[in-house]
Image (spheres, grey):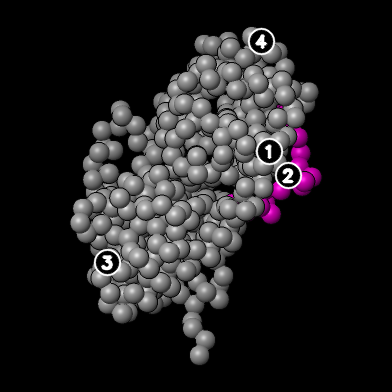
Amino acid sequence: MTQRPLRVLYFRNARGISDVTGAESYVFALLQALDSREVQGSLIAAVRPGMTHTPWIVEARRRGLSLELIEVDSKFGLQDYTRLRERIRSVGADIVHTLDHRADIVGMLAARRENCALVNAFFGWTNFSGRFSRGALYTWLDRKAQARADAVITDSGYMASFAGSGALRSPVVVVHNGVDIARFQPEAPLPDLRQRFFGRSDVFVFGVVGRVHPNKGQVDFLKAARVLADRHPQARFLIIGDAPPGWEAYRAEVAKSIVDLGLSECALLTNVASVEIPAVLSSIDVLVSPSYVESFSYSLLEAMSMRRAIIATDVGGNREMMVHGESGVIIPPGDINALVREAESLLGDPVACERLGRAARLRVEERFTLQRMAERTSAIYRELLRAREQGVGRPEIRRRVQQHSAVTRKVTS
């Protein structure tokens, strides 16, 4: 007898989201990559009233994804809880798969009430900084919700060590993010955007791609750019991305830094639609990721897929993603001198750039494809539901689901 497809509701809290972030990239990828004969998924997102045409929503619609928006009027609103319970019943959901602290809490309450399996996706608290006092509260609440989940899927062994809490912590399994290597194809005929961005195409471009946030280190990038610009007139510096709601002041700080550092003629802060990201990466010579906090960055995976040379800080899962000196260059976070040194080395060595880029693409093809991510996730869903049906305890559930982990070391310590 053929088993029916699993019905999975992906529930995202997007009340503070406007652009395509790592969580959106993750769920978009899963929805498109999972075999519909195995898993049938749809996305439900809680948004603020009126925020129904933001860039991430436009991109989801463009991709033809199944998306339902629930307008939640305040952080204490219950519209998403009520609607999620209705949807679990109406589609006969097997699993609710949540993304973000609010979604984890609301999803836990709804799934438990409807006797539905619950999976949390955990990428760390990468939007929080030391100046953001609510971060500690959100972290505490998220840990409590994770402890009630049937499983927590995280994208790196590094982040797995932070997931869940206490003796009742859920089984934690690592599934590295996967990238669509057909979409990010270096041989594809893509427009060279150097002319559009800088008015000329004969320049060497260092670029940062991702949300504009203090944890992403754009100001560090510009400080390094000031040193490099003095020595290398052909160098240009591109920052692509937008600030999450609430962080507009930091974006203004980055824009002001360009002026204050005298970089107006060679540095640009702008944003593009998601559909243009392959062309952006194709127009960058070296992708720079000067982050202080990371999980398992889609921007880096996409750049690797496009055979870009990469300089990234030693944070999050970056050392799981690339091998220093072989498929990327890894430097200490906050080390402007190291960034300048490595950037200058690559600027003067096109052979090294090509070598790093080719090795990066090969590593993606071998380890970080959408197919591998989707297959592991589907296997975890099945394993989890079998364990629930059999009524086994958490230690046995942990043993079963972790056989599908992308890393071999213990991730629940």
Principal secondary structure, stretch drawn in magenta: loop
- In the image, which disc is placed on residue 231? 4
Task: Give SS at disc 1.
Answer: helix
Task: Give yes or no for contact between labels 1 and 2 (Cβ–Cβ under 8 Å).
Answer: yes
Q: Earlier along the polypeptide chain: callout 1 or callout 3?
A: 1
* Image-quadrant location for residue 208: top right
Task: Residue at 71% x, 48% y: name it.
Answer: 185
Task: Residue at 30% x, 32% y: name it.
Answer: 132
Task: Give SS at disc 3.
Answer: helix
Task: Residue at 69% x, 54% y: name it.
Answer: 182
Residue type indicated by callout 2: Pro
Q: Earlier along the polypeptide chain: callout 4 or callout 1?
A: 4
Task: Residue at 37% x, 74% y: name it.
Answer: 385
The residue singled out by tag 2 in the image is 186
* Residue 112 is one of the magenta-drawn residues: no
Task: Give yes or no for contact between labels 2 and 3 (Cβ–Cβ under 8 Å).
Answer: no
Magenta span of residues:
179-197
Percent x, y of residue 32:
57, 62
Residue type indicated by callout 1: Gly
Q: Earlier along the polypeptide chain: callout 1 or callout 2?
A: 2
The residue singled out by tag 3 in the image is 394
Q: Nearer the viewer, mark 1 or mark 2?
A: 1
